[in-house]
């Protein structure tokens, strides 16, 4: 691998890379210094004048993932250095940077990971076909022959591949489809988080950086959205360099690549990754130098701004009026012909999937709270509530539970409009909408936590079920209003991102020659804070903003979009609630749960950092492979390397491998899960519902042993598992894990109930190596449906009480109506609200009835910045 890189990246080519990087960073640095002064002026002006739109009704958690991790578990990773598949333990902390270790013990001891993966710019693929389609475009003119074998042969039929257009590719495999789905959701969440953009808290560096990158690309003819505007600044700048550098290097290196087709593709990917790493190091160093230089001059600039603020504003308004007189007639003509006819169609394309996604967020949140309310009927104690709140508190960051919400937005399509308006891909808008959905879910959960905690402190457990319902209704209404506000802002920003670049591209040729003369109207002392290019873009933005605002306002009137009208703008209608906004997240287990037992590791003198790392609570439950034995951390799996895989006409050898795989089907697949030894050694194959795989059940030595009956195992489960049977009966829990919901298995679960295997089940040794893993055994779903278990544990009086929990309230035709109590309904009727066909009040009156302190505010017509 090193020979390939060193032979093709000689000193001459490294000099080309350094020169191209220096050219890009030099031009970017000049633009950044200009935009830094403008961003500083805008920040100081905003601090003095203030501003803002409607106030959010939900509380916001400052550090949502404190002392939490996202996910951890074991899978197989393909190693480039020895061309083998090995077991690796992956740990995803709150930073969403994927760390991989040799085994779980290495992670628990606090050792450095074998490697880390920053997922910015990556795509998560679940099939070799998807991957081969992408790499076939890496070298133009090099196409795969039909029937040829790739350089990589997956160890199982469930791959997970992280693909990047410039950087290194990562190859993983798991043994079941259920594992693949869970890991896919986790990796997608890591990509989504890394692509979220720069922190908006820095009001100077972030806008200066984004404007400098945008102006650089516009200067080179790229006006539309950009998929690779993701990651930290050094990654974004590296993508900017590679966008122009990679085609040049490909023309130089591609003719010299030798070997078969897939070998040339593989070598090119290694070379591209080496170039990307080199460019990233150089961009990082040069960007830090530019930022340091700007920050050093910030005090002088800020003092000048505060001294001459009024004169700067007056001078800017004078120049703006002059530019508007020249640009506005051309902009309005373009707007009438090329923009206005498409606003409504693009808005509908954005609204439908986005509204469905936010509606699904609401339904998921509602269902979780109803499940908790039902289970408190059985045992209405603070410990029971704390147990459920521990699971609900991280609902927004549970990739698997949120997947149904994210999938709704992924249906967004802008086909037919992408080429006209130079939109590279709808993924830019999809990921932004998904991030907003996650934020709204966490705000709703955090608000519910604070209200419920306050109620428990003041009222105790008396009427606990009704207390939960009241808190639920209160939060749902606030969610309805906030989600409407967030979506309307998202629609406005998305339309601006689509239309503004197109208008600038059309207007720049005719206006560019006239703009320099306006620079003479600006005093030299103010020229750092007033740039003609920025004013030109502001004029174009304001010319189209009126039409966008009007289109969104008209859409809000249509009930099918589930939006509040702009005339309904709530102020702080719940001042007592917002007093809780500064409170930290509630540790439900520590405050209401049973005290944790001292761990044996403390007696062995384990370091405090290792204890914290090992005890860190995990958002997603760890994977226990059904039907597979538990292996120690040093387990490994090998498959033939590249040399052992035929390039072409290899069908006979592949058939022989399949026959060998079939002969080994009685052997359990080697894998490692992240569960603690205390739990896995006691009964490594037992599921929480007492079922076992068919493969284990069929062994004669196990059939001779004494096995408890299905009824006894079910009784033991009902006494030992949590009351939330829908979750607890569907997964095997690992260390510090939470059960995941499997809803589709209930119908099949009622038909089979298998006994658990014996405790002394043999475990395959860790040192075994096989050429290919056997196909995973069929999963036997033996979970009893929740509706069939309730009569055994819920008395009749309590069963009747469950009727008090209605299904999710209808909101498709009534603007996200929430379930209201009789008093609120009486107030709404007294307000003489117009009724829909179903008898629900209009959205406006429902939002006003949220809280008695509601005060009307002026219409939300303020134009937000681009």
Image (spheres, rainbow, N blue to C red):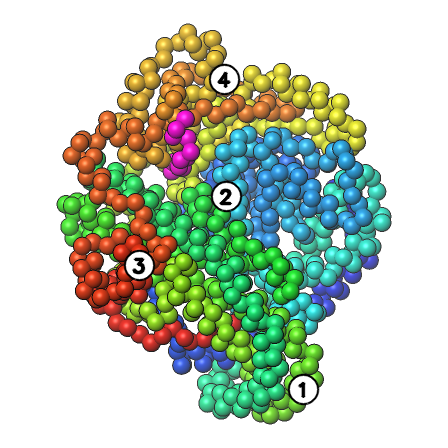
Q: In the image, what residue occupies the spot 70% across and 69% down? A: 221
Q: In the image, what residue occupies the spot 68% across and 32% down? A: 153
How many neighbours does mark 4 have within 10 angstroms: few (below 14), some (14-19), or many (20 or more)? some
How many neighbours does mark 3 have within 10 angstroms: few (below 14), some (14-19), or many (20 or more)? few
Judge whether residue 523 can be spotted in this image.
yes
Cα gap from disc 4 to disc 1, whole angstroms: 79 Å
Quickly name the residue at label 1. 514
Q: Is residue 745 magenta?
A: yes
Cα gap from disc 3 to disc 1, whole angstroms: 56 Å
Judge whether residue 681 can be spotted in this image.
no
Q: Is residue 687 left or right of residue 14?
A: left
Point out which mark residue 35 bears.
Answer: none
Looking at marks 2 and 3 on the same chain, the residue that comes earlier in the sequence is marked by 2
Mark closer to the observer (2, 3):
3
Quickly name the residue at label 2. 185
Cα gap from disc 2 to disc 3, whole angstroms: 39 Å
Position in image of residue 213 (x %, y %): 62, 68
Q: 55 above or below 471?
A: below
Point out which mark residue 836 bears.
Answer: 3
Q: Which residues are magenta?
A: 738-748
Q: Nearer the viewer, residue 1 or 368?
A: 368
- Do the numbered discs 2 and 3 sit on residues whose CB atoms are within 8 Å? no
Position in image of residue 368 (x %, y %): 33, 44
The local secondary structure at tag 2 comes to helix
């Amino acid at each position: 691998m090193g020979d390939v890189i060193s032979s093709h990246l000689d000193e001459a080519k490294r000099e080309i890379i350094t020169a191209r990087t220096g050219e890009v960073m030099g031009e970017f640095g000049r633009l950044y210094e200009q935009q830094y002064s403008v961003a500083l002026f805008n920040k100081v002006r905003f601090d003095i004048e203030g501003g803002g739109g409607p106030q959010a009704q939900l509380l916001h958690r400052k550090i949502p993932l404190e002392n939490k991790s996202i996910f951890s578990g074991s899978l197989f990773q393909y190693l480039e250095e020895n061309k083998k598949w090995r077991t690796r333990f992956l740990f995803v902390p709150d930073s969403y940077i994927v760390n991989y270790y040799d085994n779980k013990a290495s992670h628990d001891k606090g050792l450095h990971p074998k490697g880390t993966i920053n997922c910015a710019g990556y795509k998560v693929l679940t099939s070799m076909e998807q991957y081969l389609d992408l790499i076939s475009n890496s070298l133009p003119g090099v196409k795969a022959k039909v029937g040829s074998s790739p350089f990589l042969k997956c160890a199982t039929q469930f791959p997970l591949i992280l693909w990047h257009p410039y950087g290194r590719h990562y190859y993983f495999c798991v043994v079941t489809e259920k594992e693949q789905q869970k890991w896919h959701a986790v990796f997608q969440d890591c990509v989504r988080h890394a692509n979220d953009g720069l922190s908006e808290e820095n009001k100077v560096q972030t806008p200066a950086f984004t404007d400098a990158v945008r102006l650089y690309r516009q200067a080179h003819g790229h006006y539309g959205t950009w998929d690779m505007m993701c990651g930290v600044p050094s990654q974004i700048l590296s993508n900017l360099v590679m966008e122009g550098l990679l085609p040049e290097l490909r023309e130089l290196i591609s003719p010299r690549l030798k070997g078969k087709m897939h070998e040339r593709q593989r070598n090119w990917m290694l070379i591209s990754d080496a170039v990307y790493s080199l460019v990233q190091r150089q961009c990082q160093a040069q960007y830090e130098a530019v930022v340091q230089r700007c920050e050093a001059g910030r005090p002088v600039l800020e003092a000048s701004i505060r001294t001459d603020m009024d004169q700067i504003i007056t001078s800017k308004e004078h120049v703006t009026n002059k530019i508007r007189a020249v640009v506005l007639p051309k902009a309005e003509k373009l707007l009438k012909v090329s923009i206005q006819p498409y606003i409504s169609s693009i808005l509908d394309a954005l609204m439908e999937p986005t509204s469905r996604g936010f509606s699904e967020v609401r339904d998921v949140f509602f269902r979780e709270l109803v499940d908790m309310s039902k289970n408190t009927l059985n045992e209405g104690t603070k410990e029971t509530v704390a147990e459920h709140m521990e699971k609900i508190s991280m609902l927004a960051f549970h990739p698997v539970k949120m997947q149904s919400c994210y999938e709704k937005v992924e249906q967004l399509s802008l086909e037919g409009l992408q080429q006209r308006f130079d939109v590279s891909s709808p993924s830019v808008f999809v990921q932004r909408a998904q991030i907003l959905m996650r934020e709204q879910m966490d705000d709703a959960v955090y608000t519910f936590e604070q209200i419920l905690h306050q109620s428990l402190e003041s009222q105790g457990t008396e009427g606990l079920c009704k207390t939960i319902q009241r808190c639920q209704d209160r939060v749902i209404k606030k969610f309805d209003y906030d989600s409407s506000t967030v979506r309307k802002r998202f629609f406005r920003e998305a339309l601006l991102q689509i239309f503004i670049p197109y208008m600038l591209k059309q207007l720049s040729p005719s206006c560019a020659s006239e703009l320099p003369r306006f620079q003479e109207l600006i005093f030299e002392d103010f020229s750092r804070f007033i740039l003609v290019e920025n004013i030109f873009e502001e004029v174009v933005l304001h010319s189209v903003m009126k039409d966008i605002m009007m289109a969104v306002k008209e859409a809000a009137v249509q009930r099918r979009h589930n939006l509040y009208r702009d005339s309904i703008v709530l102020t702080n209608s719940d001042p007592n609630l917002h007093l809780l906004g500064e409170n930290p997240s509630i540790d439900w287990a520590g405050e209401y749960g049973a005290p944790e037992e001292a761990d044996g590791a403390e007696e062995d003198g384990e370091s405090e950092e290792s204890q914290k790392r090992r005890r860190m609570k995990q958002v997603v439950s760890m994977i226990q492979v059904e039907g597979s034995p538990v292996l120690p951390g040093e387990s490994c799996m090998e498959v033939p390397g590249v040399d052992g895989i035929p390039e072409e006409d290899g069908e006979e050898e592949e058939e022989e491998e399949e026959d060998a795989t079939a002969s080994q089907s009685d052997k359990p697949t080697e894998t490692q899960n992240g569960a603690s030894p205390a739990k896995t050694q006691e009964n490594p194959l037992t599921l929480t519902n007492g079922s076992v795989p068919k493969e284990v059940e069929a062994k004669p030595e196990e059939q001779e042993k004494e096995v408890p009956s299905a009824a006894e195992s079910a009784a033991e489960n009902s006494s030992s598992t949590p009351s939330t049977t829908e979750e607890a009966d569907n997964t095997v829990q690992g260390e510090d894990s939470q059960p995941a919901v499997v809803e589709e298995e209930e119908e099949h679960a009622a038909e089979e109930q298998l006994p658990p295997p014996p405790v002394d089940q043999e475990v395959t040794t860790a040192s075994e190596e096989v050429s290919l893993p056997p196909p995973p055994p069929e999963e036997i779903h033996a979970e009893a449906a929740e509706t069939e278990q309730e009569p055994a544990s819920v008395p009749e009086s309590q069963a009747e009480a469950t009727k008090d929990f209605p299904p999710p309230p209808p909101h498709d035709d009534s603007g996200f109506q929430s379930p209201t109590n009789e008093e609120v309904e009486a107030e709404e009727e007294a307000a003489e609200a117009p009724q829909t066909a179903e008898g629900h009040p209009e959205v406006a009156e429902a939002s006003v009835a949220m809280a008695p302190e509601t005060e009307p505010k002026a219409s939300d017509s303020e134009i937000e910045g681009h």
